[in-house]
Each structure stands twice: as structure tokens, then as C-alpha cells.
Amino acid sequence: MRLEWRDSEEIGIRLFEKYPDTDPLTLRFTDLHQRVTDLSEFEDDPKDSNEGILEAIQMAWHEEYQDAAD
């Protein structure tokens, strides 16, 4: 599946699967950006992200992280 910036929910799930022990709220947006662009399925332009997009991804990942902790 090809991932793009607009796929925040799916990216959040993939990041949780790859980094299950990482609390996404502890990451800087620069680190989050790097982890997203490092995903093998990610095929969008790295320059097309912005703070709102990264925040949506971070919140989707955080939801997965919290669900696993419950």
C-alpha cells in the first residue's frame, strides 16, 4: 500500500507497528518526519508535510499507543 501525507491514520498504525514502545508525544516533529519518510510504504514528497499533518499523524500513532497500553 502506497502511503502519502494525507494517510495519517494508516501512517500512525504503521509507526506504532514499527515502534511499539515509543510514546509518540516524546518525539520532536523533525524526528517524526524522519520516521514517516523512512517507512518503506511511504512514497510522497517529504517536502509536502507541515505541522498540521505531522500533528495528525502523531495523534493517530498516540491513539494506537494508548489502546495497546489499556
Image: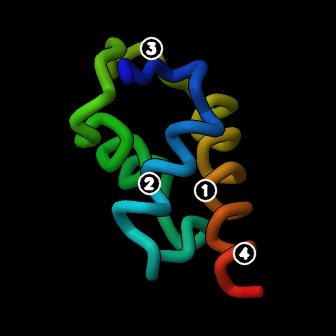
Give how far apart the Cα atoms at labels 1 and 2 are. 7 Å
Q: Earlier in the sequence, mark 3 or mark 1?
A: 3
Can you name the residue that lies furthest to the bottom here?
A: 70
Question: Which residue is found at the position 33% from the left and 13% from the top?
Answer: 45
Question: Which residue is found at the position 62% from the left and 51% from the top?
Answer: 58
- Please identify, in this view, whether the residue under mark 4 or under mark 3 is nearer the observer: 4
- Name the image quarter holding the N terminus: top left
**Is disc 4 placed on a helix, strand or loop?**
helix
Query: Would you place residue 49 above or below residue 45 in this image?
Result: below
Q: Which label sits on residue 61?
A: 1
Q: Is residue 47 left or right of residue 13?
A: left
Residue that numbered label 4 is attached to? 66
Residue that numbered label 2 is attached to? 15
* Near-viewer residue (40 or 44): 40
Give how far apart the Cα atoms at labels 1 and 4 are. 9 Å
Question: Which residue is found at the position 68% from the left and 49% from the top?
Answer: 60
Q: Residues within 10 Å of mark 4 (few under 14, many from 20)?
A: few
Q: Residues within 10 Å of mark 1 (few under 14, many from 20)?
A: many
Q: Residues within 10 Å of mark 3 (few under 14, many from 20)?
A: few
Residue that numbered label 3 is attached to? 48
Query: Would you place residue 42 above or below residue 43 in this image?
Result: below
Residue 51: where, in percent of width, then height?
A: 62, 33
Pointer 4 and pointer 3: residues touching (CB < 8 Å)? no
Q: Earlier in the sequence, mark 3 or mark 2?
A: 2
Pointer 1 and pointer 2: residues touching (CB < 8 Å)? yes
Pointer 3 and pointer 2: residues touching (CB < 8 Å)? no
Residue 4: where, in percent of width, then height?
A: 45, 19
